[in-house]
Image (cartoon, rainbow, N blue to C red):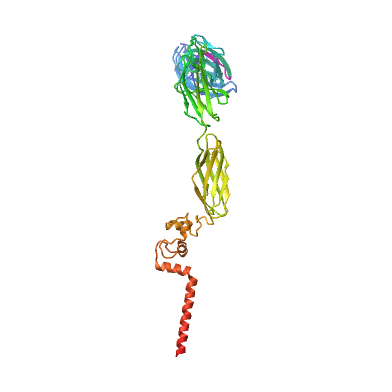
Amino acid sequence: MGRPDLEVINVTIISVSGSEKVYVNDTANINISVVSHNADVENVNISLSIIDESTEEEVFNNSDIVSLKKEVNTSISFNWFANKSGEFNVVVRVDPLNMVDESNEDNNNMSVQMIVHEWPDLVVKNIILPVDDVMEFDRVKIDVLVKNQGLGDASDYIVKLYIERVPKNGPRVMKYIGEKDSQMISVKGNSTSKVSLHWNKSEAGIWMVGVKIIVLEDQRDLNLWNNQNVSSKDLIVRSYEKNPPVISLVNVQPDTPEEGDTVTITAKIVDDTGLKTVTINITTPSDESREQPMVKTSDDIFKYIYKDTGEVGVYHFLIKAVDISFYQNDKTFEGNFTVKKDTTVPVVSFFTATPCVQVVGGYVNISCFASDNVGISSVRVKIISPTGSVSEETMTYETNNKYVYKNIYSVSGVYTYYIIVKDKVWNEVKTEEKKFWITRNVDDMDDDGIPDWWEERYGLDPMDPSDADSDLDGDGLSNLMEYRGGSNPLRDVFFENMGVRLKNNSLYVVMSIVLFLIVLLLSYIGRRMRW
């Protein structure tokens, strides 16, 4: 048995996730294979050092003690969390301190390069459909632009093509189940590549085109949400058939539209291969025409909303449907509707005066919301003052169908007002009457000298000034006198009322007392003279 010879046989590096490449934030597994020739050796030191080649700084080091059997390969593993990208020098040393007397020291070290890759970020940027007409049974070429937005290179990623028919009803959702082709693609970091995919033996119809990038377990991608995309345009494959579309269930609502009404025209339109266009041409009574597309809603129903019904008379319309076949088969339907003179009065949805109780000299704001199908011509407010005088004022349009008028009033009392609205064809509506009050005291709405709280307490009407002169308990005292005297207007209480009478008839009482004293004095003088 001679002296031992320690040798590093091999160093392998993989990601613990199974990928042969190591990416940023992966854990790299460094596996070292060591053998001892000629003899068994106990307690051999195996050290690992990882050096960043760009800075020549050591970013990791570790070591382990192992026992080596003669001519038996022994594996030692180290794990390093790769928290940065770049090129690294992995250095393995067996017996770095030369504790073992060997026959050959030249094979104790091995150095390998490890590259830590940045992550790629693949995006399906654009799906390019054919410009020329596509006929059924054609082989359709679809180009796809794939951009790598990441810093890392992407190698051998699979790009798949999906073709799915546009649903007749319900949402347009690509399910990515109708795979037609796939290709391998590699894209360097921060660059774009084009890949061509094909649909062999295409079928007639209208199709959604989707592309999806497949990321395998040992591959990386920063954002999986942008790995698929659907073409902004549909793929139309034309048929050789000659059957025209079928138009049915044409409906016009309302049955008898008036000036300014909105007219809705609907029709059910179907075709064997699919529809290219559905349009409607409407001609007014004055022979002006306009063509517009109809919008598909559900269950093959197409709809158009027409709002320009300002003329009285007959409107003619022509619906035209064209399919996507090679021959572009078409079908038309003619109809009409009659717009009658507007007899619908304007609508006043709300009107008010604020505040409803205002002091003399304060502003009162009268506002209303008015609308009409043909448009509003004028909005006026008629106001009747407490003296009976009548004024009619024009209200000003503010916004969102709101009209306003404000003014200051100097005469106290109750004011009555109502709104008059006239539309552009002279239909007129008058609202009900409402009231507001002008007073010298905001706490006395009817300005009768009695505060509202006192009238409400004893069942009087705060909006009726005449009840100040009434006598509810028949004691000869008015409600105003009872309020001023602090007595109950509902009960004839002698002692309460005596105070009120004295307060309200103080001059009479004084004169009565004076006359009484004069009578007593004269009586006294008469008796003295008789004596």
Q: Which is more toward the observer, 407 or 46? A: 407
Residue 486 lies in the magenta-colored region: no
Q: Can residue 320 be seen in this view?
A: yes
Name the quadrant containing residue 298. top left
Vertical order, 297 against 392 (above or below) = above
Residue sticking out furthest to the bottom: 531
The location of residue 457, given as percent across then percent down, is 43, 57
Residue sticking out furthest to the right: 55
Q: Which quadrant does the N terminus fall into?
A: top left
Q: What stretch is highlighted in magenta?
A: 184-190
Q: Which is more toward the observer, 105 or 65? A: 65
The location of residue 490, given as percent across then percent down, is 40, 61
Q: Which residue is drawn at 45% across and 67% down?
A: 500
Q: Which quadrant does the C terminus fall into?
A: bottom left
Vertical order, 141 against 507 (above or below) = above
The location of residue 521, given as percent across then percent down, is 47, 83
Q: Is residue 88 visible?
A: no
Number of marks: 0
The location of residue 278, given as percent across then percent down, is 51, 19
Q: Which is more toward the observer, 385 or 425? A: 425
Is 274 on the left-hand or right-hand side of 408? left
Vertical order, 222 against 261 (above or below) = above
Q: Which is more toward the observer, 66 or 274? A: 274
Residue 187 lies in the magenta-colored region: yes
Q: Residue at x 52, y 57 (%)?
A: 441
